[in-house]
């Protein structure tokens, strides 16, 4: 097979061992002789997968007893509606840090009173707004901790005077999180914890049931909490691969250990962006994401963009074209992206620079 370095933003690269286990399970799930995608989800073998997956979530993120994790379908995009359905009664605020945050706000605004408390659109979402006042009468404040498209990130769990809800699609399990500070943490699995097709939601149990509206059965977190994410057929294959991905993460030393690796990988790449005269980073330095690294050609070198893309492609770099709303390049260096891949990209940028001297 061709040697490639995959920097896709999502779905993204997963640990090889998780993929190998998935291939094995497609042939014979847990010694049953049945492919995992054909097994009944009402068997004890499948129940064991659900239990192990939940236990890994609890252990890796130190989820307190006040919270429960559920696995759902519909992508993070459907969670935008779940959030408003389950938590919006009078008024909610959204920190508008990019396209995803904006889409989350749109869903809530369709159901009730929701507004942007601060917004970084004035500089194309290259920074995280700070120092805004949070009114005490909000049902919740919604934040997007990592802005996948723009490469900005909220690095700390904020102290919030109202219930805090976070879309952590693209930085979940990349750093330690104080789950107790949030009423809800949700995201699509396909950025850091598994394949597309499953969503995680970590819910503070006693925060539910406070809204007066009718919540459709499937959109009510309580339905899924009560049934251990098995109210209806769960996405069995994505959950299986997620479980294997989390097992790999545990073997790496868990979230605390991978955080050190992630910081190292990000530092390596940002150092090259800052050093190499041909490139410049787009995000404000203090808000730079350790998951999605965005950069463009430096002023005066803009016309080299396509040339660098094909130069990098020839050297096996996959998925480094920036999102259309930012342009340039984006390297997504999630948990499963090895340090060697980042080193290869750095070497490629250096080689390109030399070729231009
Ligand atoms: C990718 C992404 C989404 C959308 O996820 P889907 O599962 O495709 O709906 C939402 N929020 C963030 C931060 C993302 O990175």
Image (cartoon, helix red, strand yellow):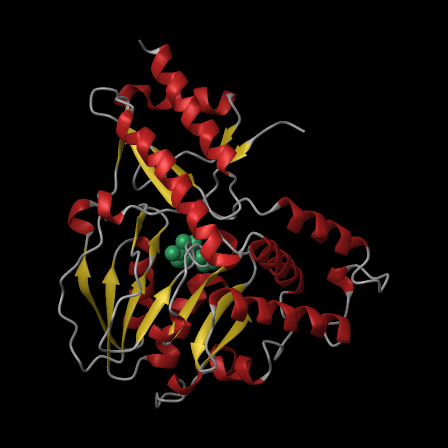
Horizontally, residue 336 falls left or right of residue 146, namely: right
Q: Position of residue 8 (x, y in %)?
A: 48, 41
Residue 158 placement: quadrant: bottom left
Horizontally, residue 231 falls left or right of residue 30, namely: left
Asked whether 137 or 80 is in front, the reply is: 137
Asked whether 288 or 265 is in front, the reply is: 265
User: Residue at the spot x=52%, y=71% of the render?
Assistant: 58
User: Residue at the spot x=44%, y=66% of the render?
Assistant: 78
Number of callouts = 0
Horizontally, residue 117 falls left or right of residue 356, namely: left
The answer to whether residue 137 is seen in the rendering is: yes
Q: Quadrant of ligand 1?
A: bottom left
The answer to whether residue 126 is seen in the rendering is: no
User: Residue at the spot x=29%, y=68% of the render?
Assistant: 142
Horizontally, residue 253 falls left or right of residue 64, namely: right
Residue 193 lies, with reference to residue 161, above or below; the image says above
User: Residue at the spot x=23%, y=43% of the render?
Assistant: 285
Q: Position of residue 312 (x, y in %)?
A: 45, 24
Residue 245 placement: quadrant: bottom right
Residue 258 lies, with reference to residue 8, above or below; the image says below
Q: Quadrant of the N terminus?
A: top right
Residue ranking furthest to the top: 357
Q: Quadrant of the C terminus?
A: top left
Residue ranking furthest to the right: 33
Q: Position of residue 278 (x, y in %)?
A: 28, 22
Residue 319 lies, with reference to residue 47, above or below; the image says above
């Amino acid at each position: 097979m061709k040697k490639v370095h995959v920097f896709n933003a999502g779905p993204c690269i997963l640990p090889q061992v998780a993929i190998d286990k998935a291939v094995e399970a497609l042939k014979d799930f847990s010694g049953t002789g049945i492919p995992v995608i054909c097994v009944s989800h009402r068997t004890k073998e499948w129940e064991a997968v659900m239990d192990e997956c939940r236990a890994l979530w609890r252990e890796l993120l130190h989820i307190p007893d006040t919270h429960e994790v559920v696995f759902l379908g519909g992508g993070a995009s459907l969670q935008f509606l779940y959030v408003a359905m389950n938590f919006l009664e009078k008024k909610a605020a959204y920190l508008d840090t990019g396209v995803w945050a904006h889409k989350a706000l749109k869903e809530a605004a369709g159901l009730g009173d929701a507004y942007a408390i601060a917004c970084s659109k004035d500089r194309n979402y290259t920074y995280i707004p700070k120092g805004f006042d949070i009114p005490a009468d909000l049902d919740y404040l919604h934040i997007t901790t990592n802005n996948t498209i723009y490469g900005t990130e909220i690095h700390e769990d904020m102290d919030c005077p109202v219930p805090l809800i976070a879309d952590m699609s693209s930085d979940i399990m990349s750093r330690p999180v104080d789950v107790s500070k949030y009423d809800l943490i949700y995201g699509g699995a396909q950025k850091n914890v598994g394949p597309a097709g499953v969503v995680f939601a970590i819910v503070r149990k006693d925060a539910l049931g406070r809204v007066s509206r009718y919540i459709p059965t499937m959109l009510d977190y309580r339905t899924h909490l009560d049934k251990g994410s098995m109210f209806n057929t769960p996405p069995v294959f994505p959950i299986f691969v997620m479980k294997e991905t989390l097992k790999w993460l545990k073997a790496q030393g868990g979230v605390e250990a991978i955080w050190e690796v992630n910081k190292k990988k990000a530092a390596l790449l940002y150092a090259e962006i800052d050093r190499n005269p041909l490139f410049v980073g787009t995000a404000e330095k203090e808000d730079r994401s350790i998951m999605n690294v965005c950069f463009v050609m430096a002023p005066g070198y803009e016309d080299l963009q396509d040339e660098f893309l094909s130069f990098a492609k020839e050297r096996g770099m996959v998925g480094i074209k920036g999102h259309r709303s930012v342009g340039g390049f984006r390297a997504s260096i999630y948990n499963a992206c090895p340090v060697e891949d980042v080193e290869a990209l750095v070497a490629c940028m250096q080689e390109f620079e030399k070729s231009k001297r």
